[in-house]
Image: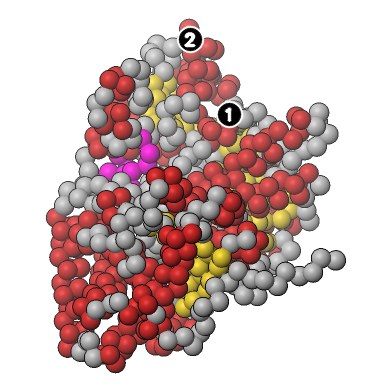
Amino acid sequence: MRELSYRHALREGLDEELTRDENVVIMGEEVAQYNGAYKVTEGLWEKWGCKRIVDTPISEAGFMGMGIGASMLGIRPVMELMFWSFHSVAFDQLVNNAANVRYMSGGLINCPIVVRGPANGGTGVGATHSHTPEGLFAAFPGLKVCSPATPADAKGLIKSAIRDNDPVYFMESTLLYGNVGPVPDPEDGDFVIPLGLADCKREGSDITLVAHGASVLQALEAAEKLAEEHNISAEVIDLRSIRPLDEEAILNSVRKTHRIVVVDESKPFCGVSAMITAIVQEKAFDDLDAPVLRVNTIDAPAIYSPGIEKEQLPNARRIVEKVLTIA
Amino acid sequence: MAAKKTTKKKSTKSTATKDYASAEVNKQLSAEDKVELYRKLVRIRRFEQFSLKEYNGGKMGGFLHLYIGQEAVAVGAVSLMGDNDHVITAYRDHGHALAVGMGMNECMAELYGKITGCSKGKGGSMHYFAPDKNYWGGHGIVGGQTPLGTGLAYGLKYKGLKGCALTFLGDGAVNQGAFHESLNIAALFELPVVFIIENNGYSMGTSQVRSSAHPEEGLAARAEAYDMDWDVCMGENLYEVRAHVWEAMKRAHEKSKPTILEIKTYRYYGHSVADANAKKYRTKEEIEKYQRDHDPLKVWQAVLEGEGVLTSEQAAEIDSAAKEEAKAAVEFAEESPYPEISDISTDIYWELDNDTEASKQGTILFD
Ligand SMILES: Cc1ncc(C[n+]2csc(CCOP(=O)(O)OP(=O)(O)O)c2C)c(N)n1
Ligand SMILES: [Mg+2]
């Protein structure tokens, strides 16, 4: 199969949806003439022009709300946040308006918007720029959240997100944009991955590692080490989408391995990992041979220091250490 | 139809041709003061040039937003600060930091993420702080510092202190909602805040005309909507910067009234060093024109040489001393240790760091 970078795969997905539906509009800071701060939208403005690819001022509350409003009229805005960390200045629009308008109107209005951009630590940009808000937004009924780890998943999911009739918050990673991987050729058909479908990235029998986004790669690296150095067979479940969440995929794996470590770059308090832990103990308690454990970002604002930033984040070493306490 | 409002709040005292050297606040400067200001400009430039080299050598993470080209704005404004005047800015913060008197060592070490940095390696380039020098950061979120500056002014007024909050922001930041809300509050509550828009013409790759709808007179003229005073000046000559900033500071000190002051300036490097498009959205000629004709260091050197207070030999000495200082700062940063893993978990809560009774009840940091 041909190989594409994560950013290229995303771009191809965006481009195909721009072609398929004339109501798809891409909007955000530096997405057009500058080609995107992280080059995801490179070349799209040249190809599609100012009507479809729109540069905005640094007014997140304003343009996010504008996208949400336009979506109520049937436009399909794909809004870029240069960093998901900047969601905070648009929070009211993102949680009060996008998440609630359908409910409060008794189902009369829907909001088919996509908000996408990178949400990750690990690049030396400090506490204001390193937020991972997938758990935060998944906590709001009315919103959907996904976080792909591979180029193929990025493409398949962004296309589904755009076609979805509800708000989908799509969280990428600046550390993944350059990664290359197989992506099906468009000539072989329309490639979409449904939201709410997890993917087993590595089969195993002794322990389940659940992760999403860049943490999937850390989990895979840890699984490799566990196999080589400790003779432990770890299964890696990539959630891909946080809400809807593929509970069955997690539970089925736990029923097989009887042990689980949840790897999650967000903080331990009320994050994605906390939710999964609750689900597993509620629904697979009898299958567990050990407590559900987690590897999160150390509970502090993101430290800048390039010397130890990676130690604050989930990494293969920390995952292996955690696994060894129960396997 | 309502008549168009004709009374503008723009400061009328300033004109482009004004002899700024004879402005009251500049006449007070001694020859030594003037040379000292030159030294400040040079130190910022050399510090940043050294940091750029080390950044390119992979010694730092993330972003490095260089201030080079804009030095006279921070140096001029900060030079007017008294004990009760405060300063806060965005992420392009090295110039303001050195201007308020932060040391090159602590600033360089912060870029390296070392424990000896001004923020113990926790904040990085965008997040310098020195509250002991009335310097409240260093803020990474565009516009996020503007309500804080308004709050510093509120605190001053509350305490009955005669001071002001110099609140810097970029030409792109003027489009953040938080800034507009701050303007209204500052005008309504009559707060002693000076909003200084450092208009370098671009927000990342977006030129001012592509980002902002505003009256012909400029970004500062948006103050009209809030019945606030405003002013515009050029940022290459320290005399001019000081004269205009002082007018606004006086308004804050004496009348407790806010001002928007737009200062036109230019950045020579990309938005951040990692700005891949740095040479695409503006021409080489444009950059060279500023470097040749509007460089704040050259302008000030020429002024001082013209006045006979600085010789080119002295200027060269100041320059080589600044280089030595920056070089030593690099060595200091290189030799300093990184924070320990345990340092990740400190400086989060005051109560915890101070091991108080309050910190002993309940779990506050989670595994
Ligand atoms: C809320 C928010 N949105 C976007 C960004 C990304 N960003 C950082 S600086 C910048 C441009 C700001 O330009 P300007 O205000 O003119 O300041 P300058 O960089 O020219 O000093 C952008 C878009 C951010 N840091 N915060
Ligand atoms: Mg600017």
- The structure residue drawn at horizontal position 48% and vertical position 56%, both measured from the top left corner, is B256
In the current view of this chain or complex, which residue is farthest to the top? A286
Q: In screen coordinates, is B130 left or right of B249?
A: left
First of labels 1, 2 by sequence position: 1
The residue marked by circle 1 belongs to what chain?
A
B336 to A135, vertically: above or below: below
Which residue is denoted by mark 1 in the rendering?
Answer: A139
Q: Is residue A44 visible?
A: no
Q: Is residue B107 visible?
A: yes
B164 to B200, vertically: above or below: above
Point out the frontmost of discs 1 and 2: 1
Give the quarter of the image for residue A121. top left
- Mark 1–mark 2 distance (CA, rounded to whole Å): 23 Å
Which residue is denoted by mark 2 in the rendering?
Answer: A285
B325 to A266, vertically: above or below: below
Type of amino acid under label 2:
Phe
x, y percent for residue A316: 33, 36
Tally of numbered discs: 2
| The magenta stretch spans residue A58 | no
Instruction: Give the SS element for disc 2.
Output: helix
The residue marked by circle 2 belongs to what chain?
A
In the current view of this chain or complex, which residue is farthest to the right? B1
x, y percent for residue B69: 39, 75
x, y percent for residue B190: 53, 53
- Report the span colored magenta: A300-311
Circle 2 packing at 10 Å, graded few (<14), some (14-19), many (20+), is: some
